[in-house]
Image (cartoon, grey):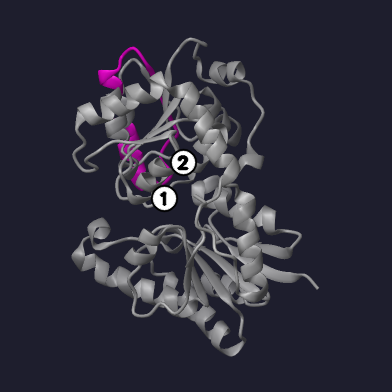
Amino acid sequence: MSRRVAVVAPDPAAGGIGRYAEALRTRVEGEVTTTCHSIPSERSVVQYVRVALDCLRSDAVHLHFEYGLFRPKLLFAWPFFVVLLLGRLFRGTPVYTTVHEVWTPETVGTLQYGYVWLIHSLVALASTELIFMTEHAREDFRALSVGSARIVPHGVPRSDRRAYSRDEARRAFGYDDDDIVVAQIGYVSERKGTDRFLDLAERFDEYEFLVAGGALRDENEPYERWVRSTAGDNVQVTGVLPDERFHKAFIAADVAVLAYRDIRQSGIMNWCFAYGVPVVCSPIDRFVELEAACTGVAVFEHPDQPDPDSLDGALFGAVRARAERSEAMIEYGRENSMDEVASAYTALFFDGSSRPITSLI
């Protein structure tokens, strides 16, 4: 009999975490039977308790944890995880929590982090097992107690690629075939470092720069307005993209720049591997590891105050060697597919075991 797994995740239309969760869910479907449980737009304690109780009717619960699911001020985490904890203790329902982001004292400030630490401890208590995507994320997730945890890294969603031609993709954004297109793809926020991207565009006015995305949440809208008002003549800002244009942005790009601040992993990086887009990126822990493993990834130095010469050199090198680096990205993506990640989760859902995965993204 197929094992029933309740999946709680952000809506796929709401960002990369939701897309990742849906890509994983579709790959484990068939091996297990999944049901999706979304957080209602009109949030209340009753709604969160109801979602948690509905989940506990399944054989297992798989939660894709991000702080935004429990806004405002993470208040709704309390009823939700308390119900899951009670269900785990009294019904024996295993709860597997994939941790997609980890706030640290540097992220939120020392005083506020005391409250975040309490939330981390609650999540850990309610979970049979915590799944992290990097070792650094596991180390940063400080909690009162973490009983069982493992690393199951990101995978490359190669089978979800779209078959648009390069000409079609470029026409969608108004670019010619001989343009050099440098892209930042994904939602716009200060943490994504779009200001660095604009500085780069100013120094490389011979290239076209594409900000393929917009503000995900209301609090990011002033930043997006600032980006639009600051952007030079060689910068295009699209706003939030529908799915079709999201994929076309990767096909249209020669190089992607991920000048992130305080972000531990990136679904956009995985799409770059899928589409063979060379990447210039911040020296966050996971990107440094990927640079060592794949010649298509180039890290620039000084994450808080990047040296313009370092970033400029990394971009120039990526553009100059984009054909070779594109092949390296594709090959690495082929060897580290999302299907491998799905196999690990399927084993986990059935018996709590999973073969170790150390080479995946």
**Residue 90 in the image: x percent, y percent?**
58, 89
Name the spot of residue 187 as percent of width and height, x first: 43, 40
Of all residues, the one furthest to the right in this rendering is: 1
Q: Residues within 10 Å of mark 2 (few under 14, many from 20)?
A: many
- Tell me which residue sits at (61%, 62%) in the image: 344
The quadrant where residue 163 appears: top right
Residues 267 and 327: in front is 327
Image quarter (top left, top right, bottom left or bottom right) of the N terminus: bottom right
Q: Quadrant of residue 145?
A: bottom left
For the record, the magenta segment spans 201-226
Are the residues flagged by discs 2 and 1 in contact, CB closer than 8 Å? yes
Residue 203 shown in magenta = yes
* Residue 321 visible to the viewer: yes
Q: Residue at x 39, y 65 (%)?
A: 138
Q: According to the image, label 1 marks what residue?
A: 265
Q: Residue at x 31, y 68 (%)?
A: 116
Q: How many marks?
A: 2
The residue closer to the viewer here, 113 or 166, is 166
- Disc 2: which residue: 269
Q: With respect to residue 185, does 155 lie above or below?
A: below
Taking the spot 50% from the left edge, 47% from the top edge, the residue there is: 16
Give residue 87's quadrant in the image.
bottom right
